[in-house]
Image (cartoon, grey):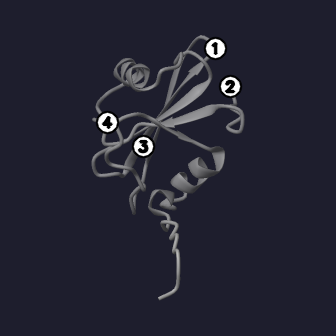
Amino acid sequence: MIIDLKKVKIFLSPGFTDMRKQINSLSAIASEKVKENIFRQNIFLFCSKNRKHLKILYWDRNGFCLWWKRLERDKFPWPRNKKEATLLSYDELKMLLNGIDFFKVHQKLDYKKVS
């Protein structure tokens, strides 16, 4: 099945995940971190400690699908320590897969006066 990424919710699991985990363990992690039904058409992203491996888990009509991406060079930008799963937009997913670290965007400065 082809997923329309603009119509699904994309959840990122902050911190690092043991990449030896397969569908059963990853689906359990996803259900613990997300307060939604994991059997809906949602996508869950998991990253390895060295940030070179990414697993994508989703439900497809009658079973889970698991994709794996391994980078030969570079690393995925990845948040280290939020307690709950982070909801990403389609554009953020594209940036993540392209290596753009949108997690470290410039903070908005709010000055009251010029000194």
CA distance separating discs 3 and 1: 23 Å
**Where is the N terminus found, in terms of image quarters?**
top right
Residue at which label 4 appears:
19
CA distance separating discs 3 and 2: 20 Å
Lower position in the chain sequence, tag 3 or tag 1: 3
Q: Is residue 18 left or right of residue 54?
A: left
- Tag 2: amino acid: Met
Q: Are marks 2 and 1 in contact (CB under 8 Å)?
A: yes
Residue at which label 2 appears:
1
Position in image of residue 59 (x %, y %): 56, 20
Lower position in the chain sequence, tag 3 or tag 2: 2
Q: Secondary structure at mark 4?
A: loop
CA distance separating discs 4 and 3: 8 Å
Lower position in the chain sequence, tag 4 or tag 1: 4
Disc 3: CA contacts within 10 A as few (<14), some (14-19) or many (>=20): some
- Tag 4: amino acid: Met
- Tag 1: amino acid: Arg
Residue at which label 1 appears:
61
